[in-house]
Amino acid sequence: MLDERKKKVLQAIVEEYVNTAEPVSSNALTSNHGLDCSSATIRNEMADLEKAGYLDKTHTSSGRIPSEKGYRYYVDELLKDDDISLEEIKYISSKLETKVNEIEDLTKIAANTISEVTHYTTVSIGPKTTSQLIQEIKFVLLGSRMMLAVILTDTGLVKETIIKFDEDVTEKQIETMNYMFNNKLKGQPIETIDRPLEEYLYDEMTYSVNVIKPVIEQIKKVLKEDEKIYLEGANKAFDLPEFNSLEVAKNFVNILDTKDVMADMLNSGFAEDINVYIGEENEKEELKDFSVVTFKHKVNGKDLGTIGIIGPKRMDYSKVISVMKYINKKLNEIEKG
Amino acid sequence: MLDERKKKVLQAIVEEYVNTAEPVSSNALTSNHGLDCSSATIRNEMADLEKAGYLDKTHTSSGRIPSEKGYRYYVDELLKDDDISLEEIKYISSKLETKVNEIEDLTKIAANTISEVTHYTTVSIGPKTTSQLIQEIKFVLLGSRMMLAVILTDTGLVKETIIKFDEDVTEKQIETMNYMFNNKLKGQPIETIDRPLEEYLYDEMTYSVNVIKPVIEQIKKVLKEDEKIYLEGANKAFDLPEFNSLEVAKNFVNILDTKDVMADMLNSGFAEDINVYIGEENEKEELKDFSVVTFKHKVNGKDLGTIGIIGPKRMDYSKVISVMKYINKKLNEIEKG
DNA sequence: TTTTAGCACTCTTTATATTAGATTGCTAAC
DNA sequence: GTTAGCAATCTAATATAAAGAGTGCTAAAA
């Protein structure tokens, strides 16, 4: 357990380093951090904190930077989670007030807002289809050989897809299909659209396979389709000094370009709350030099999308977490009322 | 006019520089370029070409690199436009064979393929809605207060949008609307959905403004919506030596992040053929250090989407243009047959 | 026992100089 | 018109030195 002064020193170092991106010297902490002692005393405290693993040095005679353990302690014990200004609150509210018709747009707007307020790159992904129930399926003929299929889920997610046929299809056929599909699928989880169902549908349907086959295939395809990942503020990262290293910059762009790393990153958080992964805490090798903060936007236990920030380990955790908490609250208000 | 040997020298320098990214010395051209003369002779030719503006030096005693005028001459006069291997042809064909149901997906696949084959970053954008005619509008009730609107255009573009109402809506109302909208809009260009039409619809519709207003607004919104821009292979650029400069890398990411620069870039080409913009030839300030190659995928004069490559001025124009030509041909075959 | 002043020591950063290597332009010969 | 030869020019790499920042330790002060 750290005593009060050590906590103060650690907190001061994290905050100072987050601000300046420079190793923090004992001298820098003697003023403006409420530490009423000399630099020599602080040096002693720093040495203790380093021995305990909370601080690192870049070389023998450098100032200190927080270690991952140091950041972790800061996030768990020391951060102020209301690090958000009135202007930021106003800005966020105004952005989220935009009337949107689809949940996915709301998630995108929230991600964009977070990126603007925190100046970090955000990534967002829509709700996982697998966790949803089919509320209704609707087929609409768009011509003699083209049909639109619309699938509504219980959380209000809408999936549409165009289906083309090799032969003419009648309104009557569509109606029958509509009835059959709904009969079988309403209220079922989306994964239901699988082998057994397929067989059933093929059996029951009296007409051409040419008609049913593309429908089933296309619907399966759309529902299993990887969720789209949206990036906001990729360029913002390049304003940070850690991205002056070409290797880091390249890694970063590579990560953003590798959609499945991003998807895994967003999907790995299970907590209801905000997930913070600092450096090595990230499962993915590629992310071990970065920090990631994510949260799932949920209403009544239903996943409506996930938003993540990816930035340097030297991230302003206070700001990021405060903003995310506030946005999460706002999103819940919007969804519920 | 350049004599044959000068052409050969220029071509050799462009090709050598495209390959190596190093200024080309007179010595490097004495072998493997069909130039049967000494390095001193080549030095003389180089000096002439530089005086004429086709070559540049990085410093007084460096080898030569092509100037923008040099690249332009190469693109206009010297490149081989069948610089594509059998494997590449096979690969492209296999990628484009995937059955897709929406035009926009086809454009995306083509852009992805180009990026894979050329190793450059590609950008693509769907068809411009403004150039299209409305073929049909279809409204589908999805619940008592939610409706789906589907707009089909003459080129097969499908736009869907969810519309939510503040009051219950009946099937009958939807049917009437369906009839009215189609009656007024079928065959019309998409811009028709504007003031005069709005008034007409408000007048004719006998029921609540609460119903018609959101419909018109949402449809307008969707149709005027900026086309989505798709990026492929943003990370590929970072393998190129010119991106070892942090400034260049940062600029590049900034450009990719600024969607309207990308959109303008894609929309500015008018030629039927392939557009090449080398460095300063780009209108946008941000692009003046890069080269851009775009082409519009058209069928029967109708715009179906635009694909662009953005890369260094030291771009493999032969490869890029060859691949684009081939892909364009393939796309036309797919659309027509 | 805790805190602090003082100072040698370490390491980074910046500046400067030196050298090796590549390539040109020019001159004069072929 | 072409080429060999060579001084001149510039880059890139390496070495050296000096300045500056910061620590750790010791011994004195509180």
Image: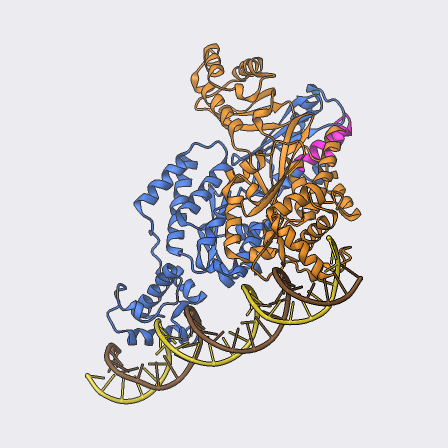
Chain colours: A orange, B blue, C yellow, D brown
Closer to the camera in the image, A209 or A272? A272
Give the image location of residue A175, x and y in percent. 56, 15
Is residue B17 shown above or below A125? below
Give the image location of residue B270, x and y in percent. 51, 52
- Residue at 54% over, 44% down: A287
Closer to the camera in the image, A313 or A158? A313
Is residue A223 shown above or below C9? above
Give the image location of residue B22, x and y in percent. 39, 65
Q: Is residue A301 visible?
A: yes
- The dominant secondary structure in magenta is helix
> Is B216 included in the stretch rendered in magenta?
yes
**Residues shaded magenta:** B199-220
Give the image location of residue B333, x and y in percent. 39, 38
Which quadrant of the figure has residue B142? top right
Closer to the camera in the image, B333 or D2? D2
Give the mark count. Answer: 0
> Is A160 included in the stretch rendered in magenta?
no
- Residue at 68% over, 32% down: A101
